[in-house]
Image: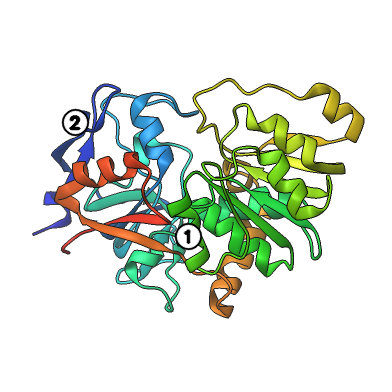
Amino acid sequence: MSFNALQAKTWRFNCIGDTDVLTLETLPVALPAAGEVLIQMKTIGLNRADVMFRRGTYIQKAVFPSRLGYEGAGIVLAVGEGVRQFSPGDAVSILPTDNLAKYGTYADKLLIPETFLVHKPDSLSWEEASSIWMQYLTAWGGVIHAGGLSKGKTILITAASSSVGLAAIQIAEAAGAKVIASTQTIEKKQRLLDLGVKDVIASEDEPDLYEALVLRLGGEHLDVAFDAVGGPHIEQIAKAMSVGGTMVMHGALSPENTPFPLKIALRKSLTMRGFLFLEVLHDPVLREQARRFILSSIGAGYLRPVIDRCFNFEDMHDAQRYLESNQQIGKIVVTLNT
């Protein structure tokens, strides 16, 4: 079969909604243009952002018919003019892009600019290689770049069972910080403890987050918070912060409104800021710093993706329902028989 006759099985949707709006379509694949690379996908990493994008609640909005999916890994099939860093046969991982609708990874073949590719680390499986960049770019950017975390400081990481939460824990520990993780259920708390996380708060067991934090810290001594939830507990976190502490909000999982704790922020001179991985992705200097840190830390064994469960490509609906159930600890991966 010539490249001109190639087709790609691609999951797309034509309206916002639940899992059932996703349909598997067969689409023609063009030859790579200048600066583009054609990839035979091996694995796809799923993220909670995918669900929010499909439901129309994410910061990016779908343009119909829309693709979706931030992450993946595969083999280079062909490269366009001017591509120098990649050749046919190379194993690559995909960086999250700034256009889910156009470059979504839920496909068995993907045409994508080379700027969103990195060589797959040899030490990682295909499943792990599709589970690196969304979580570690977000965690590095939020914890190190935005949060200013360093050795000896204390950080709270919420939604700790998510892939980004686990990535933040690994990065914070590699930086020499004391980590307090929080999650919803006692079951998830135990699973995190089993993974080696040293201190975990379960909200169903310790519903007052402020009291749980000051008990552990001996007072209001939290240096950094890396929060994916938002909602009312922002005020409890702010109360537990040290003077001059930094709160980094990178998600909005709570369906409730998020109050701004103005008087606490004033009294404690808090830095409170939002963060999105695109802040790193769009800055060449930050992107290179993050890339070097992540790859060197993977090579040294400090960072290792946690894979919760794998699904077949054709079973995307089941994978999405499991993703929506919020039962996982770590990453959900879809595998392709290619």
Q: Say how many tags the image has.
A: 2
In this orientation, which residue lies closer to the viewer: 57 or 85? 57
Quadrant of the drawing holding the N terminus? bottom left
Quadrant of the drawing holding the C terminus? bottom left
Residue under the image location 16 percent in, 48 percent down: 315
Residue 207 pos. (x, y %):
59, 38
In this orientation, which residue lies closer to the viewer: 156 or 273? 156
- The colour scheme used to paint the residues is rainbow
Left/right of residue 105 with respect to residue 248 in the rendered view: left
Q: Earlier in the sequence, mark 1 or mark 2?
A: 2
Left/right of residue 97 with respect to residue 55 in the rendered view: right
Inspect the image, locate mark 2, and give the three-letter code of the amino acid beneath it: Asp
Residue under the image location 54 percent in, 31 percent down: 252
Residue under the image location 66 percent in, 55 percent down: 180
Q: Is there any visible trace of residue 121 in the rendered image? A: yes
Vertical order, 38 against 242 (above or below): below
In this orientation, which residue lies closer to the viewer: 290 or 34? 290
Question: Which is closer to the viewer, label 1 or label 2?
Answer: 1
Residue 11 pos. (x, y %):
22, 40
Inspect the image, locate mark 1, and give the three-letter code of the amino acid beneath it: Gln
Left/right of residue 242 with respect to residue 1 in the rendered view: right
Residue 28 pos. (x, y %):
16, 42
Residue 97 pos. (x, y %):
46, 44
Vertical order, 303 against 166 (above or below): below
Looking at the image, do the residues carrying marks 1 and 2 touch, with CB atoms under 8 Å apart? no
Residue under the image location 60 percent in, 72 percent down: 297
- Please give the residue where the numbered disc 1 appears in the rendered image: 190
Left/right of residue 333 with respect to residue 150 in the rendered view: left
Mark 2 closeness class: few <14, some 14–19, many ≥20 residues within 10 Å: few
Label 2, secondary structure: give it.
helix
- Please give the residue where the numbered disc 2 appears in the rendered image: 20
